[in-house]
């Protein structure tokens, strides 16, 4: 009996131990930092410390790069180490042209790559730094790149930047080291150099239109093979695909199968930029759903043509009525009227309207043109109620495609042709004597010259 009592107490102790262990495990899991799936982050996280720290310039860049969710997922899996440049390095010491390049909406990927280059997916404190005789130690970054930690001349270095505030902020899921300057990966530097030199995306210089045979819609003389990057030989009207009241008969593009530019990638890039910019989702949805339109734009850019898109914002698109969109091909016609076959920026358009007063730009909805003039220190398109202002300038500019945000939807002016009905009135024309003869007869009658008066009669 004692054995049964002893055995029963042992079993009870074992059950209590398992329950205590399971509750402790559940409590420890509850106290862990939740992953991004929960949509929350621990208040004691290193990400909260970064957003509330002295590194305000870096935290603003992280928010503009839309990286918070990615970093939440990273701290949910493991500790991270952030190398944070001081504010002066980003605010005053950084090349203004390079900073402008990073903040352009079209260069979002470059900004994300640069910021992920400053983060290591493991915890590396100052006490774990390599010794001077151990050389450089390589660590992979969140951006699938790598950094080198160095200890030389009594200084802790990460690549070419000195650690000026080691272990500045430490949290359970990571820590932050303050560094003296910004770290720039080679891929971002090369991308910036390409954009700055405009070697691969240089805009087409204006040239005279070639002579085209109106019967065949082809060049009268076969031109010599154009080098890569040369301007198109045909006007854009002849290169467009046929459509209802949009373009003339089709003609082969100047590049043929050998496209000099990746137009499809550039069109996808500017649509992606519209979505991330915010406020232009309706325009982006139209371009995505009308795949033939986006494909046509990509083909034109691939063949060397340049385009400027006047993109109405969501508030303007919401004012479109069902009648305006019900006609066949209406969305395509609306979008084509907002595409100018020129490369224009805010500065170039504003300078034109300031200099010439009222300017009319060709559109891809031939033969309609869109008028522009200077108003309130900006560019105003159209007239009257169907007008729009340049609202968000230079949303996307890459040398081939320019996207300018406007606050209204434009429509071509309706030309009212009044046919005047000409009524032909028949008049009975009587034979009249000359005035001189009448005066002479009147005078002869007055003086009594009957012989001459009979001749007048």
Image (tube, helix red, strand yellow):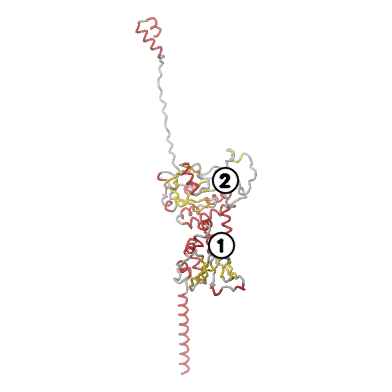
Q: Give the SS element for disc 2.
A: loop
Compared with 437, 162 (above or below) is: below
Q: Quadrant of the C terminus?
A: top left
Residue at 40% from the left image edge and 7% from the top image edge = 455
Distance of label 1 from label 2 (alpha carbons): 33 Å
Q: Are marks 1 and 2 in contact (CB under 8 Å)?
A: no
Kindly tell me whether residue 272 is visible in this rendering. no
Q: In this orientation, which residue lies closer to the viewer: 411 or 177?
A: 177
Report the disc number at residue 205. Answer: 2
Indicate the position of residue 342 as horizontal and vertical percent values. 53, 46
Label 2, residues with CA under 10 Å away: few <14, some 14-19, many ≥20: few
Kindly tell me whether residue 396 is visible in this rendering. yes
Q: Give the SS element for disc 1.
A: loop
Compared with 91, 406 (above or below) is: above
Q: In this orientation, which residue lies closer to the viewer: 44 or 429?
A: 44
Mark 1, residue position:
184
Which callout, 1 or 2, points at the residue further toward the start of the chain?
1
């Amino acid at each position: 009996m004692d054995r049964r009592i002893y055995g029963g107490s042992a079993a009870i102790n074992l059950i209590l131990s398992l329950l205590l262990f399971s509750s402790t495990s559940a409590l420890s899991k509850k106290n862990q930092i939740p992953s991004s799936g929960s949509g929350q982050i621990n208040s004691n996280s290193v990400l909260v410390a970064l957003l509330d720290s002295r590194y305000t310039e870096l935290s603003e860049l992280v928010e503009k790069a839309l990286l918070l969710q990615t970093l939440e997922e990273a701290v949910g899996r493991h500790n991270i180490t952030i190398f944070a440049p001081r504010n002066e390095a980003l605010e005053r010491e950084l090349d203004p042209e390079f900073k402008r390049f990073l903040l352009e909406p079209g260069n979002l990927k470059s900004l994300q790559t640069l910021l992920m280059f400053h983060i290591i997916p493991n915890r590396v404190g100052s006490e774990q730094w390599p010794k001077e005789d151990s050389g450089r130690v390589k660590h992979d970054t969140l951006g699938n790149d790598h950094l080198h930690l160095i200890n030389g001349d009594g200084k802790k270095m990460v690549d070419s930047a000195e650690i000026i505030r080691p272990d500045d902020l430490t949290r359970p899921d990571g820590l932050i080291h303050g560094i003296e300057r910004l770290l720039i990966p080679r891929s971002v530097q090369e991308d910036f150099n390409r954009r700055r030199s405009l070697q691969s995306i240089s805009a087409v210089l204006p040239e005279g239109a070639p002579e085209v045979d109106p019967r065949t819609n082809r060049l009268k003389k076969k031109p010599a093979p154009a080098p890569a990057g040369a301007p198109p030989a045909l006007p854009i009207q002849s290169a467009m695909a046929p459509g209802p009241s949009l373009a003339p008969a089709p003609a082969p593009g100047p590049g043929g199968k050998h496209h000099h530019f990746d137009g499809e990638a550039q069109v996808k890039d500017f649509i992606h930029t519209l979505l991330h910019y915010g406020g232009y989702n309706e325009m982006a949805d139209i371009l995505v759903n009308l795949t033939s339109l986006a494909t046509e734009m990509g083909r034109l850019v691939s063949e060397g043509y340049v385009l400027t898109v006047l993109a109405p914002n969501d508030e303007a698109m919401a004012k479109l009525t069902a009648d305006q969109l019900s006609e066949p091909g209406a969305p395509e016609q609306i979008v084509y009227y907002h595409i100018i076959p020129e490369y224009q920026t805010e500065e170039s358009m504003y300078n034109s309207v300031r200099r010439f007063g009222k300017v009319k730009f060709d559109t891809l909805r031939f033969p309609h043109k869109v008028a522009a003039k200077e108003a309130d220190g900006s560019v105003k398109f159209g007239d009257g109620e169907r007008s729009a202002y340049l609202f968000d300038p230079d949303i996307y500019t890459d040398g081939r495609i320019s996207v300018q945000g406007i606050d209204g939807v434009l429509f071509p002016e309706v030309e009212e042709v009044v046919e005047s009905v000409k009524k032909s009135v028949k008049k009975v024309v009587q034979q009249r004597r000359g005035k001189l003869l009448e005066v002479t007869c009147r005078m002869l009658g007055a003086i009594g010259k009957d012989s001459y008066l009979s001749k007048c009669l």
